[in-house]
Image (spheres, rainbow, N blue to C red):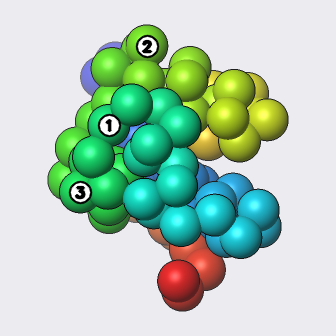
Amino acid sequence: MSAKPQTLVNTLRVERAVRRMTQAELAERVGVSRQAINAIETGKFMPSALLAIKLARVLEKSVEDLFILQDEEAAPVPQQDE
């Protein structure tokens, strides 16, 4: 039996918006560029475990709350507009 294809999605943009935090502010707090935060939010870049933990701490969430393993055919996690 083969496993279903899965993808990793994130709620970073939503959690950042709840705190009224800009990409630049979050980036500064975790030590990366604003472009890196944008790339993570849009799914173009997968953060290291270390960066995922730093993001979770700054946003006061668990890593599992920010990054969700989802079946590819499932509906995407909703994202708030900036």
Whether residue 6 appears in this view of the structure is: no
Residue 79 visible in rendering: yes
- Of residue 45 and residue 9, the one placed in the foreground of this image is 45
The amino acid marked with disc number 1 is Val
Give how far across and how far down residue 77 sits, in percent. Answer: 57, 64
Front-most of 50 and 46?
50
CB within 8 Å, label 3 to label 2:
no
Per the image, label 1 sits on a secondary structure element best described as loop
Instruction: Say which residue appears at 45% left-offset and 43% top-offset.
Output: 28
Name the disc covering residue 22, or none: none
Q: Up-down: is 14 above or below 72? A: below
Q: Quadrant of residue 11?
A: bottom right
SS at badge 3:
helix
Distance between mark 1 and mark 2 Cα atoms: 12 Å
- Name the residue tied to disc 1: 32
Position of residue 54 relative to residue 22, above or below, is: above
Q: Which residue is mark 2?
A: 50
Looking at the rendered structure, the secondary structure element under dot 2 is helix
Q: Label 3 amino acid?
A: Gln
Instruction: Kindly identify the residue that appears in the image at 77 percent across and 67 percent down.
Output: 18
Which residue carries the number 3 mark?
35
Front-most of 31 and 64? 31
In the picture, the quarter occupied by the N terminus is: top left
Identity, as a three-letter code, of the amino acid under mark 2: Leu
Alpha carbon distance from label 1 to label 3: 8 Å
Separation (CA) of disc 3 from disc 2: 18 Å
At 52% across and 55% down in the image, what residue appears? 25
Front residue (pair 31, 10): 31
Classed neighbour count for the residue bearing mark 3: other residues with Cα under 10 Å, few (<14), some (14–19), many (≥20): few
Q: Position of residue 41 (x, y in %)?
A: 40, 58
Residue 6's spot in the image, x, y percent?
37, 39
